[in-house]
Amino acid sequence: MNPFKTRTPASAEIVNWTLAPIVAELREKRVKDREGRGVSVKLPSRKALARVMEGFGAILYPLRLGHCELTPEGVDFFIGHTLDLTLTALLKQVRLEFAFSNPEAAALESAAELAVPAVSALAKELPKIRALLDTDIRAAYAGDPAARSIDEVLICYPGVVAVMHHRIAHELYKLGAPLVARMISEIAHSQTGVDIHPGATVDESFFIDHGTGVVIGETAVIGRNVRIYQAVTLGAKRFETDAAGNLVKGGARHPIVEDDVVIYAGATILGRVTIGRGSSIGGNVWLTRSVPPGSFISQAQARSEQFHDGAGI
């Protein structure tokens, strides 16, 4: 008797689910929805973009996020080969977005003509992105007493993962591929709990400590040497609507955080307000107004009283 042979348990009977009418009804709903929205082409693939981001990580940091056993002579060959594969894979996804979002580029051949310059422009920005990420990693190392090395920060810190995705996504956003950019940011969001819209502008030496629950909106502007902690929100205070009650898209609605600002855990900053240079925003603060440079904003002081035997309840 073969001990590795599996047997179907008696309780696992074959059931006739009568699937045909369910499948037919789902098809009807799907077709009706697509016809109503005019959707006729494929969307980019989140799984494919996750592989693209793995490729970019290996390109930017080949000995840490690529292959640790590469020889000095082999690093450039590895980068060149991986870069070619990664850009080709990204081109396919950007081409799908352009075909989806541009009716005049519905043919994939036409969309490809638009996608090639965008992906080529991103490729040329990779050295700049590497330089920015180096400042982010150094800021994390300098700002966290628990960090034992630069390499530990690179391979272990979720904030670095989120910022790396954002640096790539932001370039794609500027280059006219906002859907692919948003998908890349959501890949990082699902991995780290950090939600940075690809439209947000983030300068060098940016450190997100811990990171879970951080939300940074589309039009936020973050200066140099800014440090934020978990559960910080840089959001919108209100949303304008048109005469029909529909949300008005776009418009500057998120905070501006100037250089050398620290925002502690749980702080919520809403609206197009400015946090002046060198300010510190305390934990769990709710802030909807601008503050001048050098400010220290904290919660109102809690009142402390002593009660005995249930008094005061």
Image (cartoon, rainbow, N blue to C red):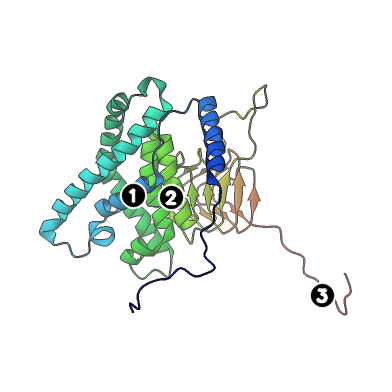
Q: Is residue 86 left or right of residue 176?
A: left
Is 245 drawn above or below residue 209 in the view shown?
Answer: above
Dot 3, how many residues are within 10 Å of its Cα: few (below 14), some (14-19), or many (20+)?
A: few
| Label 2 secondary element | helix
Is 121 drawn above or below residue 13 in the view shown?
Answer: above
Q: Residue at x 50, y 56 (%)?
A: 193
Q: Which quadrant holds residue 252?
A: top right
Which amino acid does the dot numbered 1 rest on?
Met
Towards the viewer: 300 or 85? 85
Q: Is residue 220 left or right of residue 60?
A: right
Which amino acid does the dot numbered 2 rest on?
Ile
Instruction: Give coordinates of residue 257: x percent, y percent.
Output: 51, 45
Q: Is residue 134 left or right of residue 242?
A: left
The image's mark for residue 306 is 3
**Location of the C terminus (image quadrant):** bottom right
Dot 1, how many residues are within 10 Å of its Cα: few (below 14), some (14-19), or many (20+)?
A: many
Towards the viewer: 291 or 210? 210
Instruction: Give coordinates of residue 284: x percent, y percent.
Output: 63, 57
The image's mark for residue 187 is 2
Q: Are marks 1 and 2 in contact (CB under 8 Å)?
A: yes
**Quick one: which residue is furthest to the top in this view?**
104
Dot 2, how many residues are within 10 Å of its Cα: few (below 14), some (14-19), or many (20+)?
A: many
Q: Which residue is mark 1?
A: 53
Q: Are marks 1 and 3 in contact (CB under 8 Å)?
A: no
Which amino acid does the dot numbered 3 rest on?
Gln
